[in-house]
Image (tube, rainbow, N blue to C red):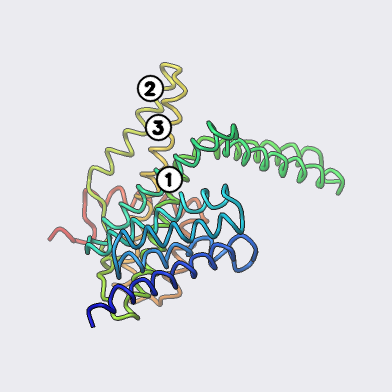
Amino acid sequence: MAPKKPTRSLVEAAFLSALTVVFCLATLYLPMLGLITSVLWPIPIVLLGVRHDLRLSILATFVAGIIVAILAGPLVAIHMFLGLGVLGLVLGTAMRHRLTPLKVVGLGTIALLVSFLLLFSLSLFVMGINPWESYFSIYQDSLESTISLYERLGINPDTIAQMEATLGQSLSMIRYLMPMAMVAGSVVLAVVNFLLSRSILARLGVAYPGFPPFASWRLPRTAALGYLAGIALIVISDQTAYEVLRHIGINIQAIFQLALLIHGLAVAWHFMEEYRLSKGLKILAVALAFITPVLGQILFFVGLLDLFFDFRRLGS
């Protein structure tokens, strides 16, 4: 039976490689389905890495990339596989070595950030295209089209001017927070792919530990120092006129503010479980935390204070 094992591995690698190609092509050519597959297509690579080894995963990923390059073009293949393809390889290898979920997601996040920076450098220095400026240009064109539509509809000029100023401020803030958005997006992609891969592995008979209950999540107290460091950089920028410090400070502050908001949500979730609120109400509270600025700010302060007062008594 031993000689069949390499053959079985190659067959499974070929199947998962083909499935990766199908998901990639669906991402490119099927708008509705592509919204899903654009995030989830690394999962076959993850499964291959867990069930076999890194060498076979790289081989299957390379073959899938060559096929996508033939069918959709080399630049498309490089863009896809240098991004999420690397994520699949890293997650699969980390899970094969039975690292903790936090380490798996952390390594996946770092891999994605490095991949995005490589893609950005490739686009900027090789092709002479700044991807961020292209995105901002599209946003600006959309803004101008929206303003023109409102003018044709006869909306009050003062209202239009106010809306234009608000949208312009949003564009400026997006420019500032692109690094933070990259970090947050990388974490989300790594978490989603880890959770779904873990679920599929469980169906295949491979058990893998998950995250602890959300109600017990907590940040170290040093998270408060990270948030204060962001504020300090902004203050220094205001005093010294070094604009780059302001960019860095705003992004550091935003990253830790989001982390502390999630910490505050975990505290709230703990007490909602204490009072046995329905799952629907708990999910509604989470949704409101991200769409209601006041509630989000309250939960941020709850998370910040919990670092020092331990409202849930987890330390004991």
Q: Earlier in the sequence, mark 3 or mark 2?
A: 2
**Between marks 2 and 1, how big is the CA–CA gap?**
31 Å
Residue, x 56% and y 54% (percent of image)? 69
Q: Which residue is mark 1?
A: 115
Q: Does residue 90 sit above or below 50 in this rendering?
A: above
How far across and how far down the image is residue 86, in percent? Answer: 40, 53
Q: Amino acid at mark 2?
A: Ile
Q: Which residue is mark 2?
A: 236
Q: Earlier in the sequence, mark 3 or mark 1?
A: 1
Q: Is residue 8 left or right of residue 308?
A: right
Q: Earlier in the sequence, mark 2 or mark 1?
A: 1
Task: Identify which residue, 172 or 25, lies in the foreground.
Answer: 25
Image-quadrant location for residue 137: top right
Q: Amino acid at mark 3?
A: Gly
Which image quarter holds the N terminus? bottom left
Residue, x 42% and y 56% (percent of image)? 188
How far across and how far down the image is residue 277, in percent? Answer: 38, 75
Q: Amino acid at mark 1?
A: Ser
How far across and how far down the image is residue 19, in percent? Answer: 49, 70
Q: Which residue is mark 3?
A: 249
Given contact means CB atoms under 8 Å apart, are the residues at marks 3 and 2 in contact? yes
